[in-house]
Structures are given as structure tokens and as C-alpha cells.
Image: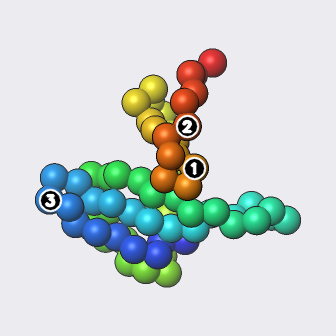
């Protein structure tokens, strides 16, 4: 993802950026991260992994229900 904004919210950082796959439309992604996000600046590239069942997905600010396989 290409970092657009990194906000210090106090107990965590809110990272906003754009994601683009080869030949696909780009989309916006927001991620809540720990202190490791403090080093990120607009224009940086960040690699993120989704690794637990507490991850929430939203489309146009609306929560998308899902269940892990």
C-alpha cells in the first residue's frame, strides 16, 4: 500500500493508503497499527498482513460481514 496519511491517535496509529494490483483499480485501505507505524510517512510503501479473526472490513465506510474459512 502507498501511505497517504499516518495519524497518531494516542494508543494506536491510523494508517490510510491506496492499494493497487497489477491491471486492477486502486482502492483505499485503513489500518489500525501499533507504534511501528510512527516511522511511516506519506509516499512510503507499507506491506501489511492480515492475521487474526478480529480484522474488520469496510466498503464505503460500511462494515462488511465475513467469517474466516
**The C terminus sits in image quarter:** top right
Contact check, label 3 and label 1, Cβ < 8 Å: no
Residue positioned 27% across, 52% down in the render: 34
- Tell me residue 40's x, y (percent): 37, 71
Q: Which of the two marks, 3 or 2, is nearer to us in this view? A: 2
Q: Is residue 64 left or right of residue 30?
A: right
| Crowding at mark 3 (Cα within 10 Å: few <14, some 14-19, many 20+) | few
| Crowding at mark 1 (Cα within 10 Å: few <14, some 14-19, many 20+) | few
Is 57 drawn above or below residue 43 in the view shown?
above
Q: Which of the two marks, 3 or 1, is nearer to us in this view? A: 1
Contact check, label 1 and label 2, Cβ < 8 Å: yes
Q: Residue furthest bottom?
A: 43
Query: Based on the displayed image, in which of its 4 quarters is residue 20 positioned?
Result: bottom right
Q: Element under label 2?
A: strand
Q: Determine the CA span between mark 3 and mark 2.
A: 26 Å
**The N terminus sits in image quarter:** bottom right
Q: Element under label 3?
A: loop
Q: Which mark is residue 10?
A: 3
Q: Determine the CA span between mark 1 and mark 2.
A: 7 Å
Q: Which mark is residue 22?
A: none
Residue underneath mark 1:
59
- Tell me residue 47's x, y (percent): 52, 57
Residue positioned 33% across, 52% down in the render: 33
Q: Residue furthest right?
A: 23
Q: Determine the CA span between mark 3 and mark 1.
A: 25 Å
Residue positioned 14% across, 59% down in the render: 10
Residue underneath mark 2:
64
> Which callout, 3 or 2, points at the residue further toward the start of the chain?
3
Amino acid at each position: 500500500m502507498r501511505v497517504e496519511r499516518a495519524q497518531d491517535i494516542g494508543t494506536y496509529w491510523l494508517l490510510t493508503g491506496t492499494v493497487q494490483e497489477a491491471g486492477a483499480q486502486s482502492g483505499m485501505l485503513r489500518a489500525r497499527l501499533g507504534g511501528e507505524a510512527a516511522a511511516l510517512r506519506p509516499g512510503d510503501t507499507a506491506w501489511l498482513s492480515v492475521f487474526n479473526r478480529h480484522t474488520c472490513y469496510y466498503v464505503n465506510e460500511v462494515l462488511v460481514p465475513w467469517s474466516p474459512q
